């Protein structure tokens, strides 16, 4: 049974796993990501791979990373959370490892995993994954194939404009969806509500020690679960904007399934509830037309390694 | 040399053409569209086809129509400008004609024609066509294949939201791109300017006989060509919103080429000029990344018949 390794390079950790042809994780290991030291990142990726292959015979290695690759997927042009700028990542890693490697954007590998093994495994044509974490990531499958784009940088749904002239985004545009539907947006909405109307945020403020600036994502989730009005409203707000973003995706791509993943989805119905309520409202004219279904992601934080390993196997 | 027939069913006319394997139109004919009489539309489509096949031997027939088809492309679910509601168009036409027919959305056939024979013929992976006429149409090619969507209704870029809570669109949403970047929007912007600041619209108002309500698309184009300030500003406004829409398409799909077509493109640089100016501005963060090129469509009003005929040949 041919095994492959998947590696997921995130802003805080490097996760590696040995994956079988059914998408099952047989072994995994991790290292912290030294975000500012590009040489050390490559050494730790190589260390993760060597540790896994010492115990398992593998044919190939797939590596997912948060960044924009060139169309040949050899060089990483830019990474928002790591120090890579025009980094020849493929050559640097392949030099350390004598098994064929393959690079891919992290949103793409997670989307592929959910399409093949996860929430959209019954779809045969098309799905879109949107991950809601600190920021917003995404990946597209159309016609049964991953969409990489003409220049290798498709799938940045978080950086389409939700509000013209709105909040400045780290990407340079004003009003990106990421500024209204991400984990960061959840915290901003909750902080604003706690400041302007503290009576509706008593539980949230209690958890935050009475300090608005101490409010973070996990506290908003905990407070919302306890019925804190301001925290519930903040989930409702990001759900509203996310539903609008999904509705626009439907207008353009009409996918069979829309999968919502990422850290914030662990809050369960707090996010998916509002999304499912606002999504059909945002598509009033689709009443008479079929519509892709919105589902929570299934694979959690192993989606990256499973997708990367599967793509390496098919490469 | 195998010939096929392409038919383009629009809101005002039914255009048919015999097309060769190089995309050349050998013969064409047309009828008016009886928009409200579904039986008569089918009879006229059949008449167009019979007239063309009397003089040319053809293998198959492709038919493009402005409407949403089901995923099997047999039934037209809804047509915004014609009386079709759950119409079994495939069976109705095939019953009249003993050569294999194929149905396709009109934006899709035009996009396919521009990809194979037109403005994007050097692209091998991906292109997006946006047509700016009375409304906004579009079609997508990804991975060298037409994108039809999981339910057959992909490519409605004109019905993504440009302005949350903005102008009511015929589709039922508020603030669709079509309300800000179409020929109808051009007229609305020009009428508003002529009403609020007639001194900047002297040429436009002269052409319209002094009546704001008489301002239409051709008059705005003529006045803009003569330097009328209000008319130039109206083109600038739709160009601004169109550039924003194209920038969002780039973020999601990263196509090799973006083609702008439709009736309004006949105004030449009046529209493409502002689009080309605002498009890179809307993608500030793409300074370091490659970007698809914006080009005017090449095939004009034969794109529909050429694309439909070519798709029928490949079917």
Image: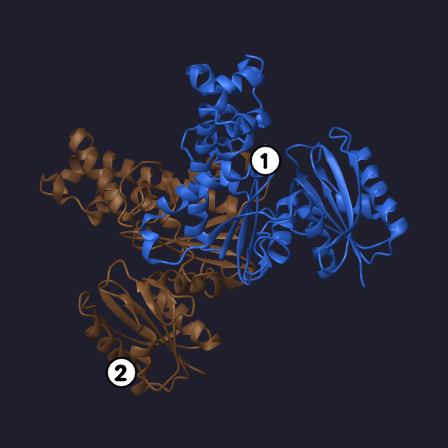
Chain colours: A blue, B brown
Residue A284, can we see it? Answer: yes
Is B4 or A237 nearer to us in this picture? Answer: A237
The image quarter containing residue B92 is bottom left
The image quarter containing residue B15 is bottom left
Q: In the drawing, what numbered circle is on residue A133?
A: 1
Q: Position of residue A69 (x, y in %)?
A: 66, 45
Is A167 or A310 nearer to us in this picture? Answer: A310
**Mark 2 = which residue?**
B51
Q: Position of residue B303 (x, y in %)?
A: 37, 64
Tell me if mark 1 has few (under 14), some (14-19) or many (20+) residues whose alpha carbon lies within 10 angstroms of its own.
some
Vertical position of residue B11 compared to residue B172: above or below: below
Is B225 or A127 nearer to us in this picture? Answer: A127
Question: Circle 1 marks a residue in which chain?
Answer: A
Q: Position of residue A189 (x, y in %)?
A: 47, 25
Location of the N terminus of chain A by quadrant is bottom right
**Horizontally, is A8 left or right of A265 in the view?**
right
Please, what secondary structure does the residue beneath circle 2 have?
helix
């Amino acid at each position: 049974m041919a095994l492959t390794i998947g590696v997921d390079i995130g802003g805080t950790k490097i996760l590696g796993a040995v994956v079988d042809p059914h998408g099952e994780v047989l072994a995994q290991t991790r290292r912290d990501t030294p975000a500012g030291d590009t040489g050390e990142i490559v050494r730790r990726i190589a260390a993760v791979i060597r540790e896994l292959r010492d115990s398992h015979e593998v044919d190939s290695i797939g590596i997912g990373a948060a960044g924009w690759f060139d169309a040949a997927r050899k060089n990483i042009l830019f990474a928002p959370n790591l120090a890579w700028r025009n980094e020849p990542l493929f050559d640097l890693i392949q030099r350390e490892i004598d098994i064929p490697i393959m690079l891919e954007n992290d949103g793409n590998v997670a989307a592929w995993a959910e399409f093949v093994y996860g929430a959209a495994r019954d779809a045969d044509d098309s799905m879109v994954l949107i991950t809601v974490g600190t920021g917003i990531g995404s990946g597209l499958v159309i016609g049964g194939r991953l969409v990489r784009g003409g220049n290798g940088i498709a799938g940045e749904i978080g950086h389409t404009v939700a509000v013209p002239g709105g909040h400045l985004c780290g990407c340079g545009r004003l009003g990106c969806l990421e500024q209204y539907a991400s984990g960061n947006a959840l915290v901003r909405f909750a902080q604003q509500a706690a400041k302007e109307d503290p009576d509706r945020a008593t539980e949230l403020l209690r958890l935050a020690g009475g300090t608005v600036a101490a409010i973070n994502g996990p506290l908003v989730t905990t407070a919302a679960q306890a019925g804190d009005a301001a925290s519930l409203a903040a989930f409702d707000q990001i759900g509203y904007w996310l539903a609008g973003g999904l509705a626009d995706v439907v207008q353009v791509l009409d996918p069979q399934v829309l999968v919502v993943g990422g850290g914030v989805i662990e809050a369960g119905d707090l996010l998916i509830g509002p999304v499912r309520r606002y999504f059909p409202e945002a598509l009033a004219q689709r009443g008479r037309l079929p519509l892709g279904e919105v589902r929570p992601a299934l694979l959690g934080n192993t989606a990256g390694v499973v997708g990367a390993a599967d793509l390496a196997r098919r490469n």
